[in-house]
Amino acid sequence: MKRTVSHSQLYPALIVVLILSAGLSVTRGAMTLPAGQSLLAIWDGIWGSSLTSLKSFQQAVVWELRMPRTLLAMAIGALLSVCGAITQGLFRNPLADPGIIGVSTGAGLGAALSIVLLPMSVAAVATPIAAFLGGLLTTLLVYRLAQSSQGTSVVILLLAGVAIAAFAGAAIGFLTYIADDQTLRDLSLWGMGTLNGASFPLAGLALATLVITLVAAQRDAGQLNALLIGEPEARHTGIDVERLKLRMIVVAAIGVGVSVSITGVIGFLGLVVPHLVRMLVGPDHRILLPLSALLGAGLLMMADVAARILMAPAELPVGLMTALIGAPFFTVLLIKQRRHLL
Amino acid sequence: MSILTLNDVSLHRNGRCILDVREAVLTQGDTVAVLGPNGAGKSSLLKIISGETVPTAGQICFHGKPLTAWNRLERARHLGVLPQSSQVGFPFTAEEVVAIGAIPLSMRKRQIAQLVRRAMHDTDVGHLAEQPYTRLSGGEKQRVQLARVLVQLSQAERPPLLLLDEPTSAQDLGHQHLLMQTLNDLRVHRDFTLLAVLHDLNLACRYGQGVWVLNHGHLQQVGAADAVLTPETVEQYWHYRPEKVTTRQHHFALL
């Protein structure tokens, strides 16, 4: 595999993609509004001016619905992609996406428990924490199961994902029986992965988590590289491998936990995005992590635009869109890895 | 002068004694071959010295200081390990693999790049810098790994120690000698001390200043290769009686 572009070329390209998809995301949707006026409405929203000629309900659509949703899509897309890159590095396997190995489902179960069992007022705060704990426990479990002296077992990694998904699915199913009507609707929508509930506070939470996750991972990027050439080798290079792994597991669990608690499980982004970036610029985490964040943010915003306009005025869950693209991609990866599986 | 000393080092696993070395001293500037039949504890010994396995009991001193008292990064700058074979699942270029050796160093980016180039030149893989590591042959991979370890040891303030686990097992005859020659140059010109697990007794005879013979976890014989590796000793531990011949260049070989 020859590298086709250098990362200094890819940065500006992805920033352009990011800006374009953000522009699309705030100007397109079920309601057709003139693009220029929509952008002016955002300007007004930020600076308190009144330049736009949109009617006030149209302004509300742009500023109160599309703007937080765009920010949320941006943050969650970046977050999931960075977490995907981290878990793939940690497990030294390109198939180790948080969704596939069961981390997202574990986080989902944690969040569902909190949504159903806790009173509404507490749940707002408790759900992200419960999702983080669910994700953390699952990651630790999968890690212990898949790791042996011969390295990471791909088969066990994937089977662990299946087992955890089955268990969490049953548990969430049980929760839906005891849930009341309102909770049930929340649960079922959220289960498919949706950016529906976007608000400025949630987008803020996601962006803050993104910054923390990205900074923490970026600091260890060089050490993650060493981990890829082998755990003993990394240890001989002077790296405290056990602590590095623990740090990365916690960081990934925070990222996945927070995003799952806000949007439900949006699959495959963490698998596809780092893989694409790696194909273009190679596996060096120091450039892989920020570039994955950029591409992931752009892709999820575009997937969300598609989800909003394909069946307008109805809305598809964005998780459906990512799965539609991601699942075939995953299959191709699986075929490529077949010789390691058998 | 000794660079490494082991005192009453033992390793037990599941109630079984895998290694029990009363005393061993490695002289600075030597190449010492660790020999022994399969399951003698050679790899375990190397893992204990590299700090990867913690011994059940005993003390290991490196440059006079207990191994556990060394700062992690400082130790990495003085003690390197060349792995037997290294699987890299992601398509790093050879150059990127070598640059990973710079992790324990404190250096500027430019200096590191220079260092990487020089190390790759020294191990004759300079032309492979841009190639994906995964596509290299076994011998090329090994030389890339050696370049990585050279980078890692390039800021050593005291003579470094390089541990090698069957460094020649994946190589053809020519590359075996090329690698051993390169290692010998490091010993002569850069003050390296080498401790290598070897299977080939003749390589040990040819390049080693000393040999350690392990059997059932015990250090049985220590000394110069030609003194230790008599047909009798070889038969005792390997259950095969070789013929010892001396070549015209006054090397000896076991057939």
Image (cartoon, helix red, strand yellow):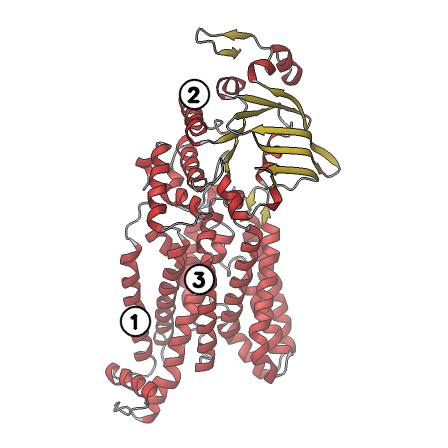
* Residue type, label 2: Leu
* Residue type, label 3: Val
Q: What residue did someone put label 1 on?
A: A19
Choose between A337 and B251: the one closer to the eye: B251
Residue A189 location in percent, x, y?
Answer: 50, 76
For residue A82, the mark is 3
Residue B128 location in percent, x, y?
Answer: 33, 37
Q: Measure the C-alpha gap from mark 3 to mark 1.
A: 19 Å
Choose between A113 and A231: the one closer to the eye: A231
Q: Measure the C-alpha gap from mark 2 to mark 3.
A: 46 Å
SS assignment at label 3:
helix
Rendered image quadrant of residue A25: bottom left
SS assignment at label 2:
helix
- For mark 3, name the chain: A
Task: Tell me: A164 left or right of A226.
Answer: right
Q: Nearer the viewer, mark 2 or mark 3?
A: 2
State if disc 1 and disc 3 touch (CB < 8 Å). no
Task: Tell me: A3 left or right of A248.
Answer: left
For residue B119, the mark is none
Choose between B225 and A279: the one closer to the eye: B225
Residue A149 location in percent, x, y?
Answer: 59, 42
- How many other residues sit within 10 Å of disc 1, few (<14), some (14-19) or many (≥20)? few
